[in-house]
Image (cartoon, rainbow, N blue to C red):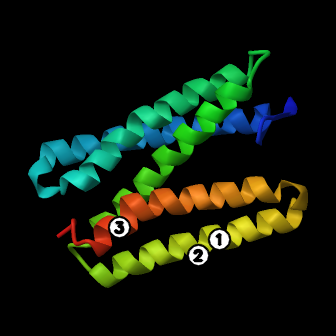
């Protein structure tokens, strides 16, 4: 297992291989979901929700490609960084879309969903910092990044009433 420090993040070839698998499964699931949406009538879906699902596909795909490079490339720092950002943005867009799809059914459940995911990620980050105190700055950065993408793509459209 190759493990080294690249700029800010730690590169781990085993973790990269797992992420390729996860991103591939998520991308396949997104194609299925998008196929169902298009055959069932995409007009029923808010463009904001649909766009997040659609944008997640290339992000997860490129992430998988970047993580594949880690397995056989000598220089991995940029591949790892690209893989991390595209994987996380793609995954968060899916989380946002799921939360926003609940708005027409029950707006309070949508709020609960977003606050639950933020709260759970905060707990996850705190545990990560407890077990890895030397990586505190990295863990804080990752949580703040998560919080920004969830707020901009999930909570803000909910609060502004962009989803009906």
Q: Is residue 119 above or below residue 36?
A: below
Q: Residue at x 65, y 71 (%)?
A: 122
The circle on residue 156 is 3
Q: Residues within 10 Å of mark 3 (few under 14, many from 20)?
A: few
Q: Is residue 33 above or below residue 28?
A: below
Q: CA distance from mark 3 to mark 1?
A: 19 Å
Q: Say which quadrant the C terminus sits in.
A: bottom left
Q: CA distance from mark 3 to mark 2?
A: 17 Å
Q: Residues within 10 Å of mark 1 (few under 14, many from 20)?
A: some
* Residue 33 seen in render: no
* Residue 86 seen in render: yes
Lower sequence index among marks 3 and 1: 1
Tell me whether the residue at label 3 lies in contact with that at label 1, contact meaning CB atoms closer than 8 angstroms.
no
Q: Is residue 24 above or below residue 95?
A: above
Q: Is residue 143 above or below residue 11?
A: below
Q: Quadrant of residue 29?
A: top left
Lower sequence index among marks 3 and 2: 2
Q: Which residue is mark 2?
A: 119
Q: Which residue is mark 1?
A: 122
Numbered disc 2: secondary structure: helix
Q: Residues within 10 Å of mark 2 (few under 14, many from 20)?
A: few
Tell me whether the residue at label 3 lies in contact with that at label 2, contact meaning CB atoms closer than 8 angstroms.
no
Q: CA distance from mark 2 to mark 1?
A: 5 Å
User: Which mark is in front, 3 or 2?
Assistant: 3
Q: Position of residue 135 (x, y in %)?
A: 83, 54
């Amino acid at each position: 297992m190759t493990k080294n420090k690249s700029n800010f993040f730690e590169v781990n070839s085993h973790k990269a291989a797992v992420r390729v698998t996860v991103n591939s499964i998520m991308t396949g699931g997104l194609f299925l979901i998008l196929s169902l949406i298009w055959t069932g009538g995409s007009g029923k879906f808010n463009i904001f929700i649909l766009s997040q699902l659609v944008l997640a596909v290339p992000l997860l795909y490129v992430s998988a490609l970047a993580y594949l490079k880690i397995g056989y490339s000598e220089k991995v720092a940029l591949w790892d960084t690209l893989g991390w950002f595209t994987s996380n943005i793609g995954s968060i867009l899916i989380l946002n879309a799921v939360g926003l799809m609940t708005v027409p059914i029950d707006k309070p459940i949508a709020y609960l969903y977003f606050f639950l995911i933020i709260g759970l990620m905060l707990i996850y980050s705190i545990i990560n910092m407890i077990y890895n105190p030397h990586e505190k700055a990295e863990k804080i950065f990752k949580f703040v990044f998560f919080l920004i993408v969830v707020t901009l793509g999930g909570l803000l459209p909910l609060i502004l009433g962009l989803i009906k």
